[in-house]
Structure formats: structure tokens, C-alpha cells
Image (tube, rainbow, N blue to C red):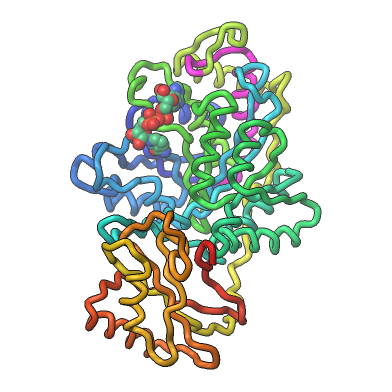
Amino acid sequence: MSTQKITIIKGDGIGPEIMNATLAILQAAGADIETEETEAGEKIYLSGITSGIAPDAWDIIRKNKVLLKAPITTPQGSGYKSLNVSIRKFLGLYANVRPCISLHPFVRTKHPNMDLVIIRENEEDLYAGIEHQQTDEVVQCLKLISRPGCEKIIRYAFEYAKLYERKKVSCFTKDNIMKQTDGLFHKVFNEIAAEYPEIANEHMIIDIGTAKLADTPEQFDVIVTPNLYGDVISDVAAQITGSVGLAGSANIGEECAMFEAIHGSAPLIAGTGTANPSGLLQGAVQMLNYIGQTEVAAAIQNAWLKTIEDGIHTADIYKEGFSIEKASTQRFTEAVIANLGQLPATFPVAYFGKNQTIQLPAYKRKPAAHKELVGVDLFVHWQKTNPEQLAAQIKQLETEEIKLTMITNRGIKVWPDGFKETFCTDHWRCRFKPVSGASIKKEHIVNLLSKAIHEETDIIKTENLYTFDGEPAFSLGQGQ
Ligand code: NAD
């Protein structure tokens, strides 16, 4: 096998210290890699590049395809784009894989039997970053969930469970409320779970799922979830293992991959020589598995577990009664290197099979459904508060065939038959549908809009209402 070239970014704060420690361990273990360093982070942000990454850094990252990245500091203030989100989206790194394992009885935790992996969708959901202010009082963020996005991440979770001999995949969504977006994620989960009868599966609503995760994490094995929920629950899960300083994560795409620690640049302890390099090292172990150097990965993992067992602990995990020695970053690194070739006595010995790559089949687009336009929602900026008055104004737009059927405010039906107690903002959704026996065409919508301009009604957006193969594909008004 030829030497694998990888890009490294040393980052900010404790980044360079933990990167140097990690590279020293990789080198001592005989990892067959050649590193090419490039720069991203605070210095680049402050030079005026709002993405935090220079164009020539992209060239290096795309050429080498494998990136080991230490944490970076995002400067305070608006206008700076998250470097992590940019890297994940530009490189199509759709799967964020974060193992969270407690190291009982050597690291203090309330959850001694926790051993789970969170697989978070990494590219879409509310992280599409499409936001608009529509009225004086209301802003919106579009939540986009796609079938290819769901299929890729959910299949990845089941393939991961198969490869690592895990028994169960749990899916967390909020599809009792978001029936279209989270509903699609849950539906695709059911479809794909059926292809893996040997792996148990379950679905939980995200709120009770998170509560159970925080209370009895040992009941979970692999968890797959959309982007935002995954962001939140993976920090909960890492924290309750004992320290955020212990976990690494992989961001996997079809062509490229990025590996990192889950924590930030910890600026307050930068330069003190006390940072725990374990999180980045755990990212590097995942990287070695990804590039096929599984024996080196296992040797490092076993030496690391042995060091934790020996009670040689950095300050973040040092506890009287659990630890033997409070170690600096350098001392901890030397201890891991000295333990290379040794095995842990209490923790299960790490072994990674030869082939650790997960290859998903190419996405196959389903035949297009029969799509029929059945109505339109006009969103109106209107500053008064009586829905009856708004209905009277909006009814001026009606034609013989297309009628106003409902008005909602923040999703709650306020006309007809609204409650006077319902609080209303200046953002109204007015639903138009054809009368029985008639149909609606896009020309009707254009007519509604041009009448609205004439009547000086402030339409801020429209949303077409469709059925797909006869199934309504839009939400009802709350209370409808
Ligand atoms: P943080 O993770 O840097 O620090 C949280 C706490 O954990 C601090 O007390 C810190 O001292 C401690 N800690 C973190 N890593 C540690 C380690 N390896 N060893 C010992 N202690 C450790 O989170 P924060 O303070 O919210 O963020 C600091 C900066 O990091 C911010 O600029 C933020 O934007 C950035 N950040 C970057 C990434 C990334 O690059 N992936 C992720 C999160 C935050």
C-alpha cells in the first residue's frame, strides 16, 4: 500500500498542542502517512476571509481528500461563516460519526456501561442556512430534508452497525409535529430498516429520546438523526461519558473525509501544556481505519486505553480516587507512545477488521410521482389584529373558482372560527383552494398576485399546495 497523503490543519488555541501530540503518536505507531499542512481559522478570518479558509487551502484539501483538523476559534460577531459547516457542505461530508464510550472505572461517569455511536446527518435540515426576514415581526429559517439525504445517512447508519457488529439502530425525529420533513426521515428509516432484518430498529420522538439518552444511555447502540438534533444530542452524549475532551468524530463523504476532536479550541488553557489530546487522537484512529491502516489504528487505541487504565490522566479527567498521576499533554503523549504494543487489561481490546470502508450504492432516483396543484398559500404582511377584517380584505382576491378557505397566524387557524385568545403577529398565511369540481392552475396564482398588488395587499411569499400520487403534501392549519 502506498503512503497516504493527508492534509492537516493545526487550528487555534490548544489546536497546535494536541495536533503535535497526535502526530507524535501516529509516527511512533508507524502510521504510513505523509502530512501536508495548510492554514485555516482565526488568522484567516481576521485577514478578511469570512469563510476562515483561503482558496489555496481548498486546493490542498481537495487534492489529498483526507483531512485531520484541530479545533479553530471562530471570532465573535456576525459575518463569520462557520468553517466546519463550510467544509462539511462543500466537500459533501454527509455523515458525522461520533462514538461516545464511557471509560469506567478509570474516568468518573454516572453511566459506566455507555457505548454508543451517534450518526448525524451533516448537510441539510435547518443547516441549509436559508433564512429571511419577512415582516417587521417574523423571520423564517427553511428546514430542507431530502430523500437522497435521508437515504444516504440512514443506510450509512445500518452499514456502520453491520460493520462494527452493533445490534440496534435508533432513529430520533419530531415527526409528530413536522409530518412532512421529519416524517420523510422516519418513513425512509422504516424502508431501509426493513432491508436489515438482522439489526433491531426503533424510532423515538427526539424529546423523550434525548431524555432517555441522558438517563439510561446504555439502552442505545447506534442513533441516527437529522442535523440539528444530532448536533445537540452528540454533545449531551459526549459530556456524560465523562469529558468532551475524550471524543473524536469523523465526517464522511463519497470522495473526501475529515476527522477531528469534538471539542473547541479551549483558548483559556492554550499554551499551558495541560490539554487532553485524546479527542483528536480518537479522530485520528477513525482516520487510520478509513484509510485502511487498521492495525496501526488498533495499536494506538489499545495503547491509549492502557494509558487511561494506568491512571495517567490530563487535568480535565483527573480525579482523586480514579487517577494515579496528573499528566501534562506531553507526559500523556509519552505514556501512550511507551504503551504501544501493550493491551488494556480491563477494557475490551480494540481490534478493527481489515476493511473498514463503507461503500454505499449510488442513489437511485424513484420514478416521478403524479404531482397535482391543489391550492396556494399566500403569506401576507398585515399589521392589524382582527382576522375577520383581514379575511374581508383578502376575499377581494377571490374568483368564481378560487376561494379563500383558511387563515392561520404562526400555523394556528384564526379564520374561520378562530379564538379571540390567540395571539397574532403581523405574518398571516391565507390558503386558497378551488371550489368543488374546479381546478387550479399556475395562471390563477399569477392572477391572485396581480390582484393583490392592485388591492395593495403585501404578499411576502407564496407556497404552492400539491398532492403527490393523490396524497396531500402540505401541513394543515393547527386546529383545522
Ligand atoms: P471548548 O470545547 O473549546 O471548551 C469547553 C470547555 O472544555 C473549556 O472549559 C475547555 O477548557 C475544556 N476543554 C475543551 N477541550 C479540552 C481538551 N482537549 N482538554 C482539556 N480541556 C478541554 O468550547 P468553547 O469554549 O465553547 O469554544 C471555544 C472556541 O472553540 C470558540 O471559538 C468556538 O467557536 C470554537 N469551537 C470550535 C470547534 C471546532 O473547530 N470543531 C468546535 C467547538 C467550538
Relative to residue 395, is residue 300 drawn left or right? right
Q: Quadrant of the C terminus?
A: bottom right
Res 233 visible: yes
Work out whether residue 19 or residue 123 is closer to the camera in this orientation and state it: 123
Residue 310, horizontal then vertical, whole percent: 63, 13
Relative to residue 341, is residue 44 drawn left or right? left
The residue positioned 59% from the left and 81% from the top of the image is: 369
Circle count:
0
Q: Is residue 312 magenta?
A: yes
Q: Is residue 399 magenta?
A: no
In the image, the segment drawn in magenta is 290-316
Dominant SS in magenta: helix
The residue positioned 50% from the left and 28% from the top of the image is: 244
Q: Quadrant of residue 421?
A: bottom left
Residue 450, horizontal then vertical, whole percent: 27, 85
* Ligand 1 placement by image quarter: top left
Residue 472, horizontal then vertical, whole percent: 57, 75
Work out whether residue 444 or residue 131 is closer to the camera in this orientation and state it: 444
Residue extending farthest to the left is 47
Work out whether residue 193 or residue 55 is closer to the camera in this orientation and state it: 193
The residue positioned 36% from the left and 50% from the top of the image is: 60
The residue positioned 72% from the left and 58% from the top of the image is: 193
Relative to residue 139, is residue 235 drawn left or right? right
| Vertical arrangement, residue 8 with respect to residue 355, above or below | above
Res 15 visible: no
Work out whether residue 194 or residue 99 is closer to the camera in this orientation and state it: 194
Q: Quadrant of residue 78?
A: top left
| Vertical arrangement, residue 135 with respect to residue 392, above or below | above
| Vertical arrangement, residue 189 with respect to residue 348, above or below | below
Residue 229, horizontal then vertical, whole percent: 52, 46
